[in-house]
Amino acid sequence: MTTRLRPPTPDSFTSRLRSPAVAARVGLWLGVSFGICFATGLVSHYAQLPTHPVPFPTSPSWGYRLTQGLHVTTGVAAIQLLLVKLWSVLPRLFEAPPLGDPRRLLLTVLERGSIAVLVAASVFQLATGVLNAAQWYPWTAFSFRTTHYALAWIAVGALLVHVAVKLPVIRDVLAHDIDDTSHDRPAATVAGPLSRRALVRTTFAAAGVAVLATAGGTVPWLRRVSVFATRTGEGPGGVPVNKSAQAAGVEESATATDWRLEVVVDGTVTAALSLDDLRAMPQRTVDLPIACVEGWSAQGTWSGVRLADVLRAAGAAAGSDVAVTSLQQAGPFRRTTLPAGFADDERTLLALDLAGAPLALDHGFPCRLIAPNRPGVLQTKWLSRLEVGA
């Protein structure tokens, strides 16, 4: 004799905790987290574009640090919220579609279709986002940045469709007490190990703990409790290192005695500056953060030559974009474009020192770019060439 396994039905789930009252309250904050994560992700994506139809602002200098920190922490909070939300609505997955009612059938198809897309996109976004923050990239078939950006729109679109379909229920549930049973399934009668209110509060507490455990990457005074932060804040000059000189393959070229920073204006090399040449120019000091797409950031005191001074001395006109090239021979950010607004900002430096000491090799010795309110991947290290009018 064999026993045939049958799929569960909604009546198989009898806990009162699996209710629209719980799902709506957790889902509300999940939507808020997704909204903040989406908006700040758009800021990060736009900041990394080579050109900006609307100039990206250079002030406040900590703007990107704030938005990217919010992006990662709200993404981390969304993990706990999403898990509880999915757990609370699991019985709906096994409901039979209302084949005899065309209107209800259409709404059911829209609801379940949007949920399928939303769940798949959300799980992908959160999973790859966590892996990106940890700088572990097990995938090779796609670009994280472009795929993450495209699926963000899909996830938000599916979320809006889902909310539109469920809005009447959401409004009615939120308008009543969390223990109201008017929208409960008939089988949901068994009390759980804790109350609905306690479940929701525990979910919010878990999300808060997860935020505290990761926010130290952005907020220095939280680093002692942020056990899951990807960066501790340690490194030369108090600034962590993402990519070492060894990993970039520049140990020899960056320390060569014949290193020169070439400045090219309209296709002609108008200056070839040694490290001594740069140190002989007027030096400036600025306090600017390094803020990375992985969510961590650190404040640094940088000293060096104003980029605008170097460009003017080489004959470049103000208001020009600058192509910046690194000594590293490979990588998507080996060559980047510095928009004119950043190039002309008096805080943008060709940094030679950090925290009063010469740049460490892993921080970009002999010379690196540092600009306000700019993603860390665009703060090019180991500079070799600046081009205006290229």
Image: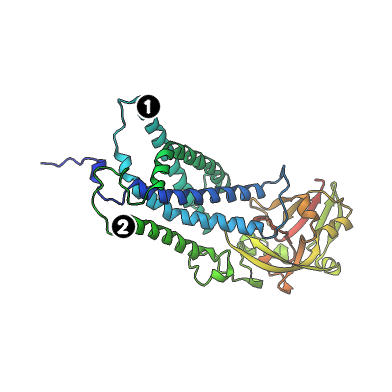
In this rendered view, identify the residue nearer to me: 38 or 129.
Answer: 38
Is residue 62 toward the left or the right of residue 33 in the image?
A: right
Q: Give SS at disc 2.
A: loop
Is residue 82 toward the left or the right of residue 322 in the image?
A: left
Circle 1: residue type: Arg
Residue at numbered disc 1? 103
In this rendered view, identify the residue nearer to me: 317 or 46.
Answer: 46
Residue for point 70% across, 51% down: 335
Residue found farthest to the bottom: 356
- Which quadrant of the rendered structure holds the N terminus? top left
Residue at numbered disc 2? 195
Circle 2: residue type: Ser
191 in relation to 357, above or below: above
> Disc 1 versus disc 2: distance between alpha carbons?
35 Å
Residue found farthest to the front: 176
Residue 286: x %, y % from top left: 75, 67
Residue for point 77% across, 61% down: 347
Residue 72: x %, y % from top left: 54, 56
